[in-house]
Image: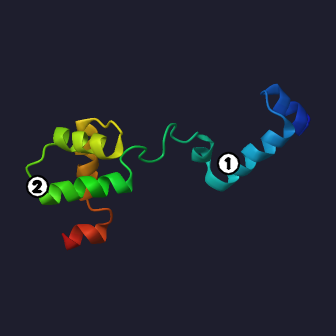
């Protein structure tokens, strides 16, 4: 059996020749994992930005008895954005977790 031209092989799988080379380069550079698409959706916080989280943490610092629902209400009043109390709770938990092994040892 002879060699099949790249253009013909790529077309058989629904790709153009250029796409074949892009895919081949990704496969060479990162292995099979490079062909798996990334996680869809937002890549970072949309509502609970750094500014909002600093506000929430300041409120908690001033009054540790505030519940997530109360914090969500305060965010709505101050920033005019609606956040779910559970989102506030999870964001606070993430901020308390050590981000590196070194941070974990310093806690």
What label does residue 52 carry, if any? none
Mark 1, Cα crowd under 10 Å, few <14 / some 14-19 / many 20+, is some
> Whole-percent x and y of residue 63?
10, 55
Which image quadrant: the N terminus? Answer: top right
Decide if residue 4 is in sight here.
no
What label does residue 63 carry, if any? 2
Look at the image and name its color scheme: rainbow
Which residue is the extreme one toward the left? 65
Q: Which of the 4 image quadrants contains residue 82?
A: top left
| Foreground residue among 1 and 50 | 50
> Whole-percent x and y of residue 106?
21, 73
> Whole-percent x and y of residue 39?
50, 40
N-term mark: 2 or 1? 1
> Whole-percent x and y of residue 66?
12, 47
Residue placed under numbered mark 1 in the picture: 27
**Is 57 situated above or below 36?**
below
Give the Cα separation between the discs numbered 2 and 1. Answer: 53 Å
């Amino acid at each position: 059996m002879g060699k099949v031209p790249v253009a013909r092989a790529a077309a058989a799988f629904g790709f153009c020749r250029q796409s074949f080379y892009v895919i081949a380069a990704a496969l060479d550079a990162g292995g099979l994992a490079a062909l798996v698409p990334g996680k869809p959706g937002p890549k970072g916080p949309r509502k609970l930005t750094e500014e909002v989280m600093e506000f929430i943490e300041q409120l908690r610092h001033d009054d540790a008895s505030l519940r997530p629902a109360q914090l969500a209400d305060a965010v709505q009043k101050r920033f005019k954005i609606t956040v779910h109390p559970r989102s506030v709770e999870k964001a606070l938990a993430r901020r308390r977790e050590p981000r590196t092994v070194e941070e974990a040892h310093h806690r």
